[in-house]
Image (cartoon, rainbow, N blue to C red):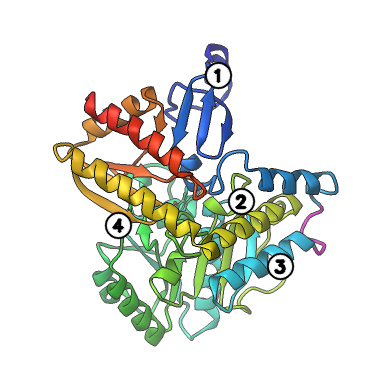
Amino acid sequence: MSSIKELDTSYVLPTYARADVEFVSGDNARLEDANGKKYIDFTSGIAVCSVGHANKRLSDALCEQLHKITHISNLYYMAPQARAAEKIVKASGYDMKCFFGNSGAEANEGAIKIARKYGEKDGEVKRYKIITLEHSFHGRTITTVKATGQEAMHNYFGPFPDGFVYAQNIEQIPSLIDDHTCAVMIELVQGEGGVQPLDKKAVQDLALYLKSKNVLLIIDEVQTGVYRTGEFLASNLFEIEPDVITLAKGLGGGVPIGVVMTSKKDVFSAGDHGSTFGGNYLSATAACEVVDILEEMYNAGTLKENINYFDAQLQKLYEAHQGIFTSKVGIGMMCGLRVKDAATLASIITKAREEGVMVLKAGRDTLRLLPALTITKEEIDEGFTSLNRALSSL
Ligand SMILES: *Cc1c(COP(=O)(O)O)cnc(C)c1O
């Protein structure tokens, strides 16, 4: 580890405050570090490894594809990309088409381009403004960092693209719409902002209002998408019909991929958008296999069982440590506990790792849990036993 740490410090730019651990292998929700220490992973690589580490079905499908062809560019038809698009659209239940990129930020960039072009074509005045929420997170590119409603992230890097407007809450959005507004972009459960679900009725009301104003509703499902909340999309759970949806984290099971899908199928024409890597044989094969695995679990009821079991253990932990936690938050396998203060949260995360369970932070004071959707009861039990020990030792 020390030599890896030295290499990293010497050659990798210091954009991350890394924890002092190097993982070398994994098996579903289990991890092992370079010293042979074992962990239960309640993070799944920040909601990415949705089917667990070293998933055999996923790695077999990837190996089989890699032995044939990995990449050929979007100048040609690619069977896995076309199949992945069909699976994603059918699982969503919406009448949409997909564009493939490589990350969440890139998917959101695509969504913003669709909204801006729609706003230009669809009216006499050019509509370009996009309303987002405070405490949101939409990515790290210049445009998506500006779309992110957190002032602290706008300190450097300017000038930024114009046209992002921040609403304090969902109820305030209608009053911010003017003749130049083309879209509203929101997360249904704010992830980085603190695992905060929006109110379902308020979202449904907003969706209807935006339709009446011909303002597009973009749902950033980069974290909530691909069964994280128990349904394929949080939009399904909230029973709304968005115009644009973005996906990324859990879709490739660890292989980088991002998708923007929209019901506005004819806004983009050839040449309007593109990606060298997006949806190549590798990432599209990953998406096909991940969606298949999770869809089978969903249909068999095992996803629901896992979610219920995880939630019951989280509830017990919450009740057992009332002095530390102030509330329980989240939906499905995107959940957490609000901690009384930020310093306590920091020590929980370190103590948990020492006790052999990986957990995350969100916002200032939220302990965030994003386990693999395939996590077993044994893994859940072991993880909560370790977490309980960590909390008792504070
Ligand atoms: C993680 C995240 C992003 C950014 O995704 P990247 O792949 O890191 O670019 C955007 N939106 C939401 C809601 C996210 O959780």
What label does residue 252 carry, if any?
2
* Image x and y of residue 359, in percent: 38, 36
> Residue placed at 46% from the left, 74% from the top?
242
> Residue placed at 28% from the left, 75% from the top?
201
The answer for how far apart the CA atoms under marks 1 and 4 are is: 40 Å
- Secondary structure at badge 3 equals loop
> Residue placed at 69% from the left, 43% from the top?
59
Q: Nearer the viewer, mark 4 or mark 3?
A: 4
Q: Where does label 4 land, which residue?
A: 134
> If you read the primary sequence from the N terminus, does the residue marked by circle 3 or circle 2 appear first?
2
- Name the foreground residue: 233 vs 276: 233
- Mark 2 neighbour class, 10 Å CA radius: few under 14, some 14 to 19, many 20 or more: many
- Secondary structure at badge 2 equals helix
Look at the image and say whether residue 74 sits in the magenta stretch: yes
Q: What type is the residue that disc 4 sits on?
A: Glu
Residue reaching furthest to the top: 2
321 on left or right of 205 = left
Quadrant of the image for the C terminus? top left
308 on left or right of 264 = left
